[in-house]
């Protein structure tokens, strides 16, 4: 009960089905809502058996964090300047850049709830 109350305070959440199929060390881009009407693009990453979410927009010069294999199985990549990000924290691991935006996720029964 208390968990639902705190979920309410986190803001709007969306249910994303089938994320349990995302393999370890992989990233997958997900579109939430209509991209032409202010939708959001998120990159889901599986690292150390956990699911993490980053905004697809790199904070440096409009690049995009890509889907596919994570570098060394743990770093999301923006190919514009070859910047690497830690999906757990959004911090840049390689390159001088601000933190990538992260989103709270909770995985359950092969699906996940993501708070925007």
Image (cartoon, rainbow, N blue to C red):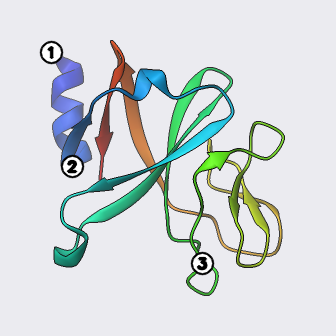
The residues bearing labels 1 and 3 have C-alpha atoms spaced at a distance of 40 Å
Q: Quadrant of residue 95?
A: bottom right
Q: Callout 2: helix, strand or loop? A: loop
Question: Residue tagged by mark 1?
Answer: 1
Q: Could you tell me residue 73's position as x and y percent?
A: 77, 36
Q: Is residue 22 left or right of residue 70?
A: left
Residue placed at 58% from the left, 43% from the top? 27
Q: Are marks 2 and 3 in contact (CB under 8 Å)?
A: no
Q: Kindly check if marks 1 and 2 are in contact, taking CB atoms under 8 A apart as contact.
A: no
Q: What residue sits right under mark 3 in the picture? A: 63
Residue 100 screen position, x and y as percent: 58, 63
Give residue 51's position: percent from left, percent from top. Answer: 52, 31
Left or right: where 101 falls relative to 91: left
Tag 2 residue: 11
Is 45 left, or right, of 112 in this rendering?
Answer: right
Residue 112, image quadrant: top left
Mark 1 vs 2, N-terminal side: 1
Mark 1 or mark 3: name the one nearer the start of the chain.
Answer: 1
Q: CA distance from mark 1 to mark 2?
A: 17 Å
């Amino acid at each position: 009960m208390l968990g639902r109350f705190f979920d309410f305070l986190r803001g709007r959440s969306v249910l994303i089905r089938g994320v349990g199929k995302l393999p370890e060390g992989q990233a997958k881009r997900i579109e939430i809502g209509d991209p032409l009407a202010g939708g959001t693009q998120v990159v889901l990453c599986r690292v150390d058996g956990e699911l993490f979410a980053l905004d697809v927009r790199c904070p440096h010069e409009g690049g995009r964090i890509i889907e596919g294999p994570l570098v060394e199985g743990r770093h999301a990549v923006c190919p514009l300047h070859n910047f690497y990000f830690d999906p757990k924290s959004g911090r840049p691991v390689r390159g001088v850049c601000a933190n990538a935006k992260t989103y709270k996720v909770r995985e359950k029964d092969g699906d996940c709830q993501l708070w925007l």
